[in-house]
Image: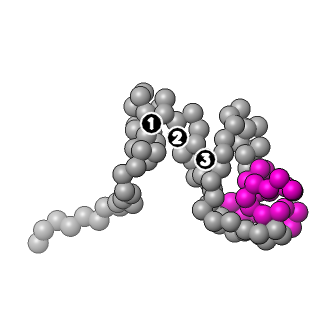
Amino acid sequence: MPNRRATAMAPRWRSSSWWSAASNAMSGDADARSEGRRIAVLLEYDGTAYSGSQYQENGPSIQAELETAVEKLTGETVRAAFAGRTDAGVHALGQVAAFDTV
């Protein structure tokens, strides 16, 4: 009987420049590190006091809060992209946002 060994496999992604750069940066490739990384975050929030998840000039937004927090943490100004959006006053559990860093 052949030796069958279960192995965990990482998910396969279609090739794209940000994924390649992030993968190379994690493996120690110096050239890839200079390109930066894309970081995805999973968000949970109470949206009662917000005008929605996307940036709004007429009121506070989750995107503005996230970008401010990243800037305070890293010193970098970033622009976050959300996988979906919420309207004013809507809560979220598991909303995905991503941003690029240097």
Give the amino acid type for the residue marked by disc 1 in the picture: Ala
Q: Are marks 1 and 3 in contact (CB under 8 Å)?
A: no
Q: Main secondary structure of the magenta part?
A: loop
Residue 71 percent across, percent down from the top left: 73, 38
Q: Which mark is residue 2?
A: none
Q: How far is mark 1 from mark 2, CA to CA?
A: 8 Å
- Circle 1 or circle 2, nearest the eye: 2
| Few, some or many residues within 10 Å of mark 3 (<14, 14–19, 20+) | some
Percent position of residue 67, x then y: 72, 46
Q: Are marks 1 and 2 in contact (CB under 8 Å)?
A: yes
Residue 15 point in image, percent of width and height: 36, 51
What residue is shown with label 2? 37
> In terms of sequence position, does the residue under pointer 2 or pointer 3 come before the other?
2
Label 1, secondary structure: give it.
Answer: helix
Is 85 contained in the magenta span? Answer: no
Picture quarter containing residue 78? top right
Question: Based on the displayed image, in which of its 4 quarters is residue 62 positioned?
Answer: bottom right
Kindly state the secondary structure of the residue where label 3 is placed.
Answer: strand
Please indicate whether residue 73 sits to the left or right of residue 35 in the image: right
Q: Mark 2: few, some, or many residues within 10 Å (few <14, many ≥20)? A: many
The quadrant the N terminus occupies is bottom left
Q: Residue at x 12, y 68 (%)?
A: 2
* Magenta segment boundaries in residue numbering: 42-65
Amino acid type at circle 2 is Arg
Q: Quadrant of residue 53 in the image?
A: bottom right
Q: Secondary structure at mark 2?
A: strand
What label does residue 99 carry, if any? 3
Q: Determine the residue positioned at 68% across, 60% down.
A: 43
Q: Which mark is residue 25?
A: 1
Q: Is residue 10 visible?
A: no
CA separation, marks 1 and 3? 16 Å
Q: Of callouts 1 and 3, which one flags the residue occurring earlier in the amino acid sequence?
A: 1
